Image (spheres, helix red, strand yellow):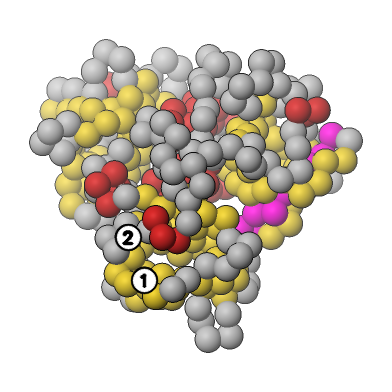
Amino acid sequence: MRRGTKLIVSLVLVGTLLAVTGTAWAQGPAGRETLRGQVVAIDGNVLLVSTASGEERRVILGEETRLLFPGVREPSIEDIEVGHYVGAWGEIGEDGDLLARVVVVVPAALAQRGYAVQGHVARIDGRVLTVETPRGERMVITGEETRFIIPRVEEPTIEDVQVGDPLLALGRPDEQGNLVARVVAVVTPGQVRRHTLRGVITALEGDTIGLLTGRGDVRVLTDDETVFRIPGVEDPGLDDLRVGDRVGVLIARAEGGDGGLLAKVALVRRADESLSGTLTAPVEAATALLESFAQQVGIN
């Protein structure tokens, strides 16, 4: 995190991009839900979404729905097309429809390119990892510039990766559909979820951040060691945060006291920022989080 990685997109978008390429979204509290899939029909303000299980669900957009679309400054439902992938979060209505608070749209061409690979290592051949994923095998090509993150291993390399390891790789696909990896982490989805939160800031009180997340209302402590990253803000701190900002937080358990949640890293995107130039930003942001696991929290 202290390498100064530039972050220009919300962690909501990162979560969606990873979700459509294999990383599941965590289930929210009772009465709320996250849903992802491909748009198969549009009727007014209602999206019919086909999920990975084959189930078709209705996602309803209202006046308060926050719509995010890479490259579109002020997106509306008119910008959504059949074939787009979406990630949505909101409340479940009495009829089972999802009343969306946030909808992130990912064009099919981008979603299907596969900027992330997650699964278990099936084979290792030199610098090439064959990874077994829920959608079949993917080849992950590593090189001298690939950064490896392996818990409790100092300066890890591909030699430290073993067949059977859970693996998350981020990078860019080549023309054959293989992933040219920028970062390779030996980590499970559960480990990622246990150490991260994302949501909207609802309150700032002293050294405490109030967040509205998929887990409900959460209060996160900060201290002198908390690292903040805000696009366009040099050396940001807690005083630079605003109510309404969207934030992804790397968390640990605070020592002493009641053992509450402590923010190790906070990645912020302003509420009024548009999404632009986002093809590489999700990889940069997710890479920053994975580096933070190794450097500041450790994975357990």
Compared to 154, does 150 lie above or below? below
Q: Position of residue 191 (x, y in %)?
A: 50, 44
Quadrant of the frame with the N terminus: top right
Residue matched to label 1: 42
Which residue is the site of mark 2? 81
Q: Seen in the image, is 166 located left or right of residue 76? A: left
Q: Residue at x 45, y 34 (%)?
A: 276
The residue lying toward the viewer, choosing from 212 and 152, is 212
Residue at far left of view: 176
Magenta region includes residue 214: yes
**Quick check: 186 above or below 32?**
above
Q: Residues within 10 Å of mark 1 (few under 14, many from 20)?
A: some
Q: Is residue 261 left or right of residue 282?
A: right
The secondary structure that most of the magenta stretch takes on is: strand
For the point 55% across and 16% down, the residue is: 4
Amino acid type, label 2? Glu
Question: Which of 11 and 3 lies nearest the eye of the viewer?
Answer: 11
Q: Quadrant of the C terminus?
A: top right
Q: Quadrant of residue 64?
A: bottom right
Mark 2 or mark 1: whose residue is earlier in sequence = 1
Tell me if residue 230 is in the magenta stretch.
Answer: no
Disc 1 element: strand
Return the x and y of residue 194 as percentages of the image width and height.
57, 47
Residues at discs 2 and 1 in contact (Cβ within 8 Å)? yes
In magenta, the rendered stretch is 207-215
Instruction: Let me know if residue 249 appears in the view.
Output: no
- Please state which amino acid type lies under the numbered disc 1: Ile
- Measuring from the top left, give residue 203's x and y in whole percent: 81, 46
Instruction: Judge left or right: residue 282 versus residue 184.
Output: right
